[in-house]
Image: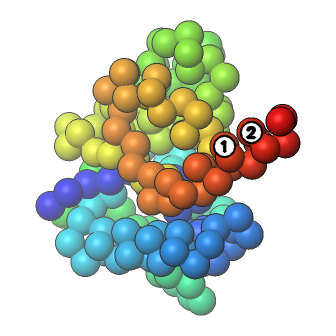
């Protein structure tokens, strides 16, 4: 069984709730969440920060979208060690979490996403973090990788397009 850390944006895209996500991106997120539900697991923090963010943004009734079904499954099985690995992450004033890398290149990394990085690094499963459309992960990808964080971009075309668009505007 392979465990993953899932940024909330993946479930939101699977629910078709991100206007910047094209159909291919939505399907990639639906498929990734489906694989986790069918035969994978998720890494959660024991302080419930990750599940709280998922619950705040998704429907715990499990409907109407694939992201909602995913968060319901996670919520219902968060104590099941076959489905969820609970890790301890420690809040820290300067970095957000003690487990978050102390790397100056990550000083501007989104404070709300630091819990996902901390959970991945605290995990004994060495999970990758799934991201769909959050560009902060893309812009900090090399620094995260250098710190031992594996990020899987389900919609890499989203970022290629964004970079091309910025270049055109600056020409």
Q: Nearer the viewer, residue 141 or 124?
A: 141
Badge 2 crowding class, 10 Å Cα cut-off, few under 14, some 14 to 19, many 20 or more, is few
Using residue 35 as the reference point, say whether residue 9 is left or right of it.
right
Q: Can residue 72 be seen by looking at this rendering?
A: no
Identify the residue at horizontal 37%, vertical 29% (top origin): 145
Identify the residue at horizontal 15%, vertical 61% (top origin): 1
Looking at the picture, does residue 122 appear above or below residue 81?
above
Identify the residue at horizontal 32%, vertical 53% (top origin): 4
Could you say where residue 19 lies in the image, as x and y percent from the top left? 74, 69
Please identify, in this view, whether the residue under mark 1 or under mark 2 is nearer the observer: 2
Q: Nearer the viewer, residue 111 or 135?
A: 135
State which quarter of the image contains the C terminus: top right
Q: Which numbered disc covers residue 133? A: none
Where disc 1 sits, the SS reads helix
* Residue projecting furthest to the left: 1
Q: Can residue 148 be seen by looking at this rendering?
A: yes
Q: Nearer the viewer, residue 23 or 63?
A: 23
Q: Are marks 1 and 2 in contact (CB under 8 Å)?
A: yes
Identify the residue at horizontal 70%, vertical 64% (top origin): 20
Using residue 43 as the reference point, say whether residue 62 is left or right of it.
right
Total number of numbered discs in the rendering: 2
Looking at the picture, does residue 78 appear above or below residue 23?
above
Using residue 65 as the reference point, say whether residue 130 is left or right of it.
left
Tell me which colouring the rendered structure shows: rainbow
Looking at the picture, does residue 111 appear above or below residue 103?
below
* Residue projecting furthest to the front: 171
Where disc 2 sits, the SS reads helix
Residue bearing mark 1 = 163
Badge 1 crowding class, 10 Å Cα cut-off, few under 14, some 14 to 19, many 20 or more, is few
Residue bearing mark 2 = 167
Q: Quadrant of residue 33?
A: bottom left
Could you say where residue 52 lies in the image, as x and y percent from the top left? 57, 56
């Amino acid at each position: 069984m392979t465990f993953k850390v899932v940024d909330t944006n993946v479930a939101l895209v699977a629910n078709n709730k991100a206007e910047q996500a094209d159909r291919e991106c939505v399907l990639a997120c639906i498929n990734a969440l489906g694989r986790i539900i069918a035969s994978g697991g998720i890494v959660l923090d024991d302080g419930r920060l990750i599940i709280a963010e998922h619950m705040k943004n998704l429907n715990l009734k499990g409907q109407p979208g694939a992201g909602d079904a995913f968060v319901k499954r996670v919520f219902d099985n968060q104590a099941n060690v076959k489905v969820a690995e609970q890790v301890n992450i420690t809040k820290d004033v300067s970095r957000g979490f003690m487990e978050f890398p102390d790397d100056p290149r990550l000083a501007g990394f989104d404070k709300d996403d630091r819990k996902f990085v901390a959970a991945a690094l605290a995990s004994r499963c060495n999970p990758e973090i799934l991201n769909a459309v959050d560009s902060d992960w893309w812009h900090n990808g090399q620094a995260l990788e250098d710190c031992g964080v594996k990020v899987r971009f389900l919609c890499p075309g989203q970022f290629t397009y964004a970079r091309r668009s910025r270049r055109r505007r600056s020409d």
